[in-house]
Amino acid sequence: DIQMTQSPSTLSASVGDRVTITCRASQSIGSWLAWYQQKPGKAPNLLMYDASSLESGVPSRFSGSGFGTEFTLTISSLQPDDFATYYCQQYSLYPHTFGQGTKLEIK
Amino acid sequence: EPQLVESGGGLVHPGGSLRLSCAASGFTVSSNYMIWVRQAPGKGLEWVSIIYGDGYTYYANSVKGRFTISRHNSENTLYLQMNSLRAEDTAVYYCARGRRMLANWGQGTLVTVSS
C-alpha cells in the first residue's frame, strides 16, 4: 500500500496567518491527490483534487500544489472557520490511502 | 443535490456480523463508483472498499475476506456486510461517491465491537 505522511501533525496558528501543510507519498502518485477538511462530528469535506484543482464552492484562499511524492496545501489567510483537521488522500493505486491528518489549532 | 444516509450501526460482539446501509438520493448508485471509508474514534480516515458501476469490487487488506460491498439497484442503496468483526473494526463508517476524489459523503454510522 502507498503510505501517505502529513506534516506537521498539529499546527497552531492565528487568524490571518498563512499556513502550509505537507503530504508525502511513499511512491510517485503523479497528481492523483485530494485534500479534505474535517470538523469534529462531521464527515470530511473535499477541498482540492488532482493536487491543485479547487473544488467548487471552496474559498480561493485554499490552494494546492505538488507532483510525484511531495504535495502542499496552503491557506493564504486563515479564517475562524478554517480551524479543523486536514487530510490528504492518494487515488493513484488501491487502496486509496489517507494521511494521518493535520490538526490546525488556534494559537 | 446528491445525498447519502447511512444506517445499521450499533454494538456487536467480537466475531459477530452487521450490515450497514447507505441510502442514496439525487443520483443512481448503480451508475456510480461507491466507497466505504471508516474512522476509528479519535483516529484518521481509512479507505475500506469500492464498488464500480459494473460490479467490480476492491477491499483494503484489513477487511478482505470479512467484509462485502454490494448494492440494491431498485432501492438505490449501498451495503457493507461485515462478518467476523474485531475490536479494531470499531469506527464511524461513511459511504461516499466517487472513483477518485470523494465529493459526496454521508453523515456516518457508528459501529462498536465490544464484549
Image (spheres, coloured by chain):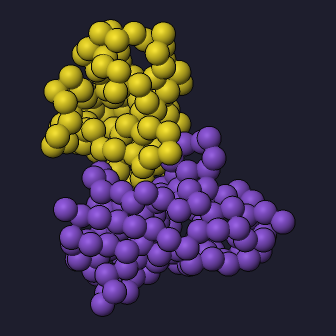
Chain colours: A yellow, B purple
Task: Point out residue B4 in the picture as x, y percentages from the top left corner.
Answer: 35, 66
| A4 or A56, nearer to the observer | A56
Residue positioned 48% across, 10% down in the render:
A107
B44 to the left or right of B57: right
Q: Is residue B2 visible?
A: yes
Among the 4 quarters of the image, the one containing residue B89: bottom right
Residue A51 against residue A13 in the figure, above or below: below
Among the 4 quarters of the image, the one containing residue A25: top left
Task: Point out residue B76 in the picture as x, y percentages from the top left corner.
Answer: 31, 81
Task: Point out residue A74 in the picture as x, y percentages from the top left corner.
Answer: 29, 21
Residue positioned 53% across, 24% down in the render:
A9
B28 to the left or right of A39: left
Among the 4 quarters of the image, the one containing residue B54: bottom left
Identity of the residue furthest to the bottom in this view: B74
Task: Point out residue A73 in the picture as x, y percentages from the top left corner.
Answer: 31, 26
| B52 or A28, nearer to the observer | B52
